[in-house]
Amino acid sequence: MIVVTRFAPSPTGYLHLGHAYSALYASRTAADAGAGGRFLVRIEDIDTGRCRPEFETAIQEDLAWLGLEWEVPVRRQSDHMEDYADALARLDGMGLVYPCFCSRDEIQEELEAAGGAPHGADGPLYPGTCRELDSDERTTRIDTGAAYALRLDARLASSQTGPLSWTDQKQGESQADPAAHRAGGLARTDGAPSYH
């Protein structure tokens, strides 16, 4: 079995104690796996408004100060925008994405109007408001310059992939129901991918 771990900070500030713990844990887990263990650092630098090169440099200096070693080169998310665009185009070609024109405030208002439901394990779920819009309405809104995010139709995607399961070393067999999460945001109007 190959064990691959990663530490994926956003260079929007300096490392804090929680970052250090996470990086140390990931590094140790990879080292404990023996020769097959790999520890990766992935810089989540797609938030161009908040990410700074000096924080990225400081993160790597702090990791080295902690005595950590990772595979090089470091993966920088901003270097892979074309990969994300290709993946998004494939999902779109499969009919698995749709534009959502709702703002966060509008989603919250709809949830409150519905009595706060529906809820998932991590809180309120996106209610799927724009999933049911017909193609003419979507086209009209896009053509008039309405801002939107591209969302994954998790219900439809799950029907094509079947069950999602994995084996955790401590918890054993686990299963997830992606359809229960309704619709994950994949990209903004400008095509920038969402952070997951």
Image (cartoon, rainbow, N blue to C red):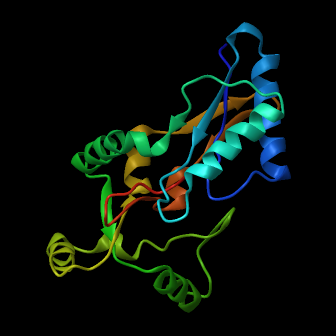
| Residue with the most extreme front position | 54
Q: Residue furthest top?
A: 35
Q: In this view, does 154 lie above or below 115?
A: above
Q: Is residue 25 visible?
A: no
Q: Residue at x 22, y 47 (%)?
A: 93
Q: How many tags in the picture?
A: 0
Residue that appears at 82% across and 18% down: 32
With 144 as the anchor, is 77 left or right in this view?
Answer: right
Whether residue 118 is visible here, answered yes or no, is yes
Q: In this view, does 193 lie to the left or right of 53?
A: left
Q: Position of residue 68 (x, y in %)?
A: 78, 28
Q: In this view, does 171 lie above or below 55?
A: above
Quadrant of the rendered structure where residue 164 is? top right
In percent of the image, x 63 and y 34: which residue is there?
41
**Residue depicted at 82% across the width and 51% down the height:** 18
Which of 159/9 is in front? 9
Give above or below for 126 relative to 61.
below
Position of residue 51 measured from the top left corner of the image (x, y, whole percent): 55, 57
- Residue 155 lies, in percent from the top left, at 43, 55
In this orientation, which residue lies closer to the viewer: 24 or 121? 24
Q: Quick check: 13 above or below 177?
A: below
Query: Which of the two residues, 7 or 119, is positioned nearer the viewer here?
Result: 7
Please tell me in which quadrant of the rendered image residue 34 appears: top right
Q: Quadrant of residue 1?
A: top right
Residue 138: horizontal and vertical position, in percent?
A: 21, 73
